[in-house]
Image (tube, grey):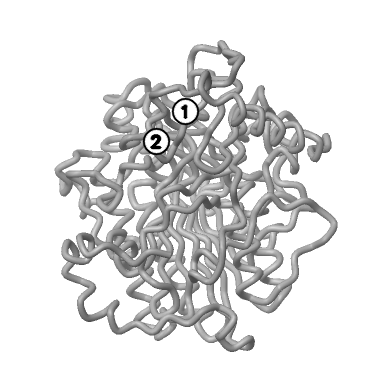
Amino acid sequence: MKPLSSGIIAMTGLLSVGIASQQCTPADERSKTDKPNFIVIFTDDMGYGDIGVFGHPTIKTPNLDRMAYEGQKWTQFYVAASVCTPSRAGLLTGRLPIRSGMASDRRRVLFPDSNGGLPPGEITIARILRENGYRTAMSGKWHLGHKSPFLPTDHGFETYFGIPYSNDMDRVLETRGVSQITLAEEENFEAYNVPLMRDDQIIERPADQRTITKRYTEEAVERIREFKDEPFFVYLAHSLPHIPLFRSEEFKEVSLAGFYGDVIEEIDWSVGRILETLEEEGIAENTMVIFTSDNGHWHIFETHGGFGGLLRGAKGGTFEGGMRVPTLFWWPGQIEPDVVMELGTTMDLLPTFCKLADIDLADDRIYDGYDISPVIFGTGSNPRDIVYFYRGTQVFAIRKGSYKAHFKTRPEYGDPTTTIHDPPLLYNLDIDPSEKYDIADDNPEIIAEIKKVLEEHLATVVPVENQLEK
């Protein structure tokens, strides 16, 4: 991999001493008995351009920027779907949500009246790590089933503290439009009667979401300190910046970017608390921390919905802004600082964690994730060359290498019309990440190659019970 550019080093003022002195050790040279810890920090609806190091000019994110400068900023990292439930299923299982029944064309996510969830037969990151000696804990938004046997504690997590679905559900007061969302947060958070759970019990309803980022963080910090002498996996899944927006008192009107900026800056504070705790406990050099988002920004809520940077599209759709997400890897003393432009997805985390922990994957199922540790450590080539862009149960687009073909397109929300493209729209994302210039007419051979990829992929998809429509 290429070294971090001197321009970025000059910008930080952080690297001249700290990073230059790091001695990075490839995974295969570390002690097999010294299994690494893993922390995944997953935000909800954060856009590609919502943090400083990914280009936002007025949101201050010093802790996230630090993760990038001391670790790795991945610029072409994707999720399994452009909405919450299927995206989270893909992250935790290493499999496309179509394989677990966690994708639907009628109900795109789970709701409080849903009876389904992530099937008990699925193997999550938490389950496979726990079965191999890891401690496991989750705080935050689950959204993979709010009834047993679908809860986090049914899927390998020893403890759970959080809201089991989206923070705008269980609405009991009418709140329409950005101004009313602000009113609900500032004066009446009880407009959303969402439950706060401890393991499988509701302990607060409605959850006071004005302090939810802080409380999720405190829970994660407590678990890190409890688990510090054993290998552990902590999953911190923030409910925000999904609307309605909330922030604690200390973060009101601190950001130049307004209400939304306040929310992001509090999440950045949360990241800082996690990194600080690892350093205080002396376990930072044995802990890989990944920060990313479940999908792109929710643009229909204007200034409350975030910013996608130069990417076209947003949450709910299959253009880049819906599924390419800001992603950071931090592991001091273990990985070289870099800006990584290779392809990666959240589904790659499970196989990568298993490789680093010396755990074999189950051989009775198809995994759509890859072990990307050769890219992380600069020891080999990237096994990922393809990304599938599902909307519900249908493949709308495929990226192979630099090229992305759109077979179908549809507006993210509102207009139900699906447009079939024949020939498909074709973009070179290395040259045209904004997907502005269709080059299909000049590249029929590339389209033919990607069509073959689609045909081969669809042959591997076996029908299963749909969980979102139960």
Q: Residues within 10 Å of mark 1 (few under 14, many from 20)?
A: few
- Which of the 4 image quarters holds residue 184? top left
Visible residue check, residue 458: yes
Indicate left or right for 334 with 368 as reference: left
**Residue located at (66% from left, 22% from top):** 106
Q: Which residue is mark 1?
A: 172
Residue 348 coordinates in the image, percent (x, y): 60, 56
Q: Which residue is mark 2?
A: 433
Q: Is residue 210 positioned above or below 176 on the image?
A: below
Whichever of labels 1 and 2 marks the residue nearer the N terminus, that label is 1
Between 104 and 165, the one nearer to me in the picture: 104
Pair 1/2: label in front: 2
Residue type (three-letter) at the residue carrying disc 1: Val
Distance in Å between CA atoms under marks 1 and 2: 41 Å
Is disc 2 placed on a helix, strand or loop?
loop
Q: Residues within 10 Å of mark 2 (few under 14, many from 20)?
A: some
Indicate left or right for 279 with 409 as reference: left
Residue 45 coordinates in the image, percent (x, y): 42, 40
Indicate left or right for 243 with 470 as reference: left
**Residue located at (42% from left, 80% from top):** 24
**Residue located at (17% from left, 61% from top):** 11
Residue type (three-letter) at the residue carrying disc 2: Pro
Q: Is residue 425 positioned above or below 294 on the image?
A: above
Residue 203 coordinates in the image, percent (x, y): 53, 54
Indicate left or right for 356 with 215 as reference: right
Visible residue check, residue 111: no
Residue 242 coordinates in the image, percent (x, y): 41, 39
Specify the label residue 272 is tagged with: none
Is disc 1 placed on a helix, strand or loop?
loop
**Residue located at (63% from left, 47% from top):** 90
User: Which quadrant would the N terminus be assigned to in this image?
Assistant: bottom left
Between 62 and 254, the one nearer to me in the picture: 62
